[in-house]
Amino acid sequence: MRNGIEFKVYGKYALFTDPLTKLGGEKLTYSVPTYQALKGIVEAIYWKPTLLFVVDEIRIVNAIRMESKGIRPIEYGGGNTLANYTYLKDVCYEVRAHFEFNMNRPELEHDRNENKHHNILKRSLQAGGRRDIFLGARECQAYVEPCVFGEEPGFYDNYGEIHLGNMVHGINYPDETGRAKMEVRLWNPVMKDGVIRFIRPEECTQVRTISDMQPKLFNETNVQSADELLAELELEGNA
């Protein structure tokens, strides 16, 4: 895949919250990550407003297991509530993703240097990401490293198809769509032999508007170009 990366992300716990379970203060995880959660992980490895990251597919390496915990949520008005959160346990995923240029950002045309962005992305992945990595929730710390997709044996190899029902695919933001709205996307994923192939955000037919929203302002004054960033990284490498 052009401008693509393949990486493994793993951690002790994950919480990809099913929004239907949050109404009563409880949290129950989906059995697999959402597209948006994986996109957030890729953007924690390397992100710039010039780029749009597309998650192509995920491979579930470990068996899907869950564990419930009694959690005391932060209540700023006081209180002593005990909530039940259900996490995924001992998770490991292989992910394929790539980037494209965000054509809804014409003011960042000067930063569309494909080769340099790809080099920075690979360096950032090798270093474990430019920001902290989390699996759905901040208390679920994770780690990333390069891998060869499909090389490691997985629990669901030759397992067949598993239909996962209706799930959140992700969130549409105005700087990605060109529409002054925040929207949520839904879809019905199927896992085959441990692999889920994601449809692209624009291919989702179940889209609901959440609220009106204006895109954030980025331009040459507050965005460092790929040329400058790569030069800094090369300087750090030689130091």
Image (cartoon, rainbow, N blue to C red):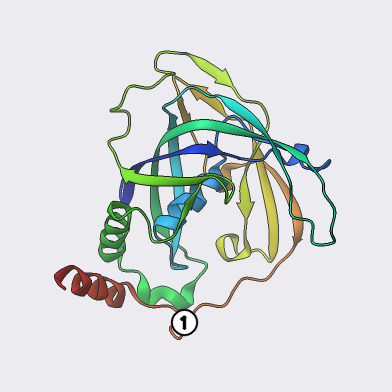
Furthest residue in direction front, as rendered: 80
Q: Looking at the image, is 104 positioned above or below residue 90? A: below
Task: Tell me the amino acid under the disc marked 1.
Answer: Asn
User: In the rendered image, which quarter is residue 45 located in?
Assistant: bottom left
Which residue shows up at 25% across the image and 60% down it? 119
Residue 26 seen by the camera: no
Q: Quadrant of the C terminus?
A: bottom left
Q: Quadrant of the N terminus?
A: top left
Q: Between residues 217 and 7, which one lies in front from this camera angle?
A: 7
**Label 1 SS:** loop
In screen coordinates, is 227 left or right of 51?
left
Q: Looking at the image, is 152 positioned above or below residue 168? A: above
Question: Count the marks: how many?
Answer: 1
Q: Which residue is mark 1?
A: 222
Q: Between residues 1 and 87, which one lies in front from this camera angle?
A: 87
Residue 143: % across, % down: 40, 46
User: In the rendered image, which quarter is residue 163 located in?
Assistant: top right
Residue 37: % across, % down: 55, 46
Residue 187: % across, % down: 64, 35
In screen coordinates, is 24 left or right of 16?
right
Residue 164: % across, % down: 61, 25
Furthest residue in direction left, as rendered: 238
Which residue shows up at 18% across the image and 68% down it? 237
User: In the rendered image, which quarter is residue 127 located in?
Assistant: bottom left
Residue 24 seen by the camera: yes
Q: Looking at the image, is 141 positioned above or below residue 162? A: below
Judge the density around disc 1: few (<14), some (14-19), many (≥20) Cα neighbours within 10 Å.
few
Which residue shows up at 66% across the image and 26% down it? 165
Q: Between residues 223 and 2, which one lies in front from this camera angle?
A: 223
